[in-house]
């Protein structure tokens, strides 16, 4: 038709695939940071573990991580299933009450010093990881 110009470009990246790749890489980065946090905590944890010949697991042996994806929300939860009572089978999780003067902890709460505070600091590193993943997902 006179006075009309049309340009068609087929080949733009699919935004859904880009976002899926980004979410996958962000999830991998989040899980890697979680493994680093748990490794750091275990290396400085002030109790001995099964590696020293104890027959039952101690709090140092009872870390686990749980990763969840709910829509565009990624969640990593660090658990420690240490319990009070005989043979660690009591009703209460006591991980939040462990304090120590060992390994430079100065009598402070071990969970706060070795999990919570490092997790807050790791947030900046995670943001860098996601930014790098976004650049990769968008081809840059």
Image (cartoon, rainbow, N blue to C red):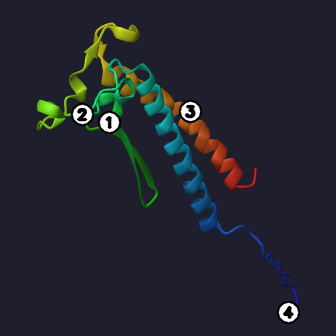
Query: How far apart are the alpha carbons under marks 1 and 2?
Result: 6 Å
Check contact, mark 1 vs mark 2: CB within 8 A: yes
Could you say whether the residue bearing mark 3 is in a helix, strand or loop? helix
**Callout 2: helix, strand or loop?**
loop
Which of the two discs, 4 and 2, labels the residue nearer the N terminus? 4
Number of the front mark, 2 or 3: 2
Question: Dot 3, crowdedness within 10 Å: few (<14), some or many (≥20)?
Answer: some
Residue 39 x/y as whole percent: 47, 30
Label pair 3/1, CB-CB below 8 angstroms? no
Q: Quadrant of residue 87?
A: top left
The reply to whether the C-beta atoms of the residues labelled 3 and 4 are less than 8 Å apart is no
Q: Where does label 3 land, which residue?
A: 125
| Residue 95 location, quadrant | top left
Q: Is residue 105 visible?
A: no
* Residue 66 percent coordinates (x, y): 38, 48
- In terms of sequence position, does the residue under pointer 3 or pointer 4 come before the other? 4
**Secondary structure beneath disc 4?**
loop
Q: Nearer the viewer, mark 4 or mark 1?
A: 1
Residue at label 4? 1
Secondary structure category for the residue under label 1: loop
Q: Nearer the viewer, mark 3 or mark 4?
A: 3
Instruction: Find residue 62 and name its label.
Output: 1
Q: Nearer the viewer, mark 3 or mark 1?
A: 1
């Amino acid at each position: 038709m006179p006075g009309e110009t049309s340009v068609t470009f087929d080949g733009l990246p699919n935004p859904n695939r880009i976002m899926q790749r980004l979410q996958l890489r962000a999830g991998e980065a989040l899980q890697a940071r979680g493994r680093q946090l748990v490794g750091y905590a275990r290396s400085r944890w002030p109790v001995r573990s099964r590696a020293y010949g104890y027959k039952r697991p101690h709090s140092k042996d009872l870390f686990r991580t749980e990763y969840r994806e709910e829509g565009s929300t990624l969640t990593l939860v660090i658990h420690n299933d240490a319990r009070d009572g005989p043979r660690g089978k009591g009703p209460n999780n006591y991980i939040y009450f462990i304090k120590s003067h060992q390994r430079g902890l100065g009598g402070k709460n071990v969970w706060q010093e070795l999990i919570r505070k490092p997790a807050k600091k790791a947030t900046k590193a995670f943001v860098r990881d996601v930014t790098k993943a976004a650049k990769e997902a968008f081809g840059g």
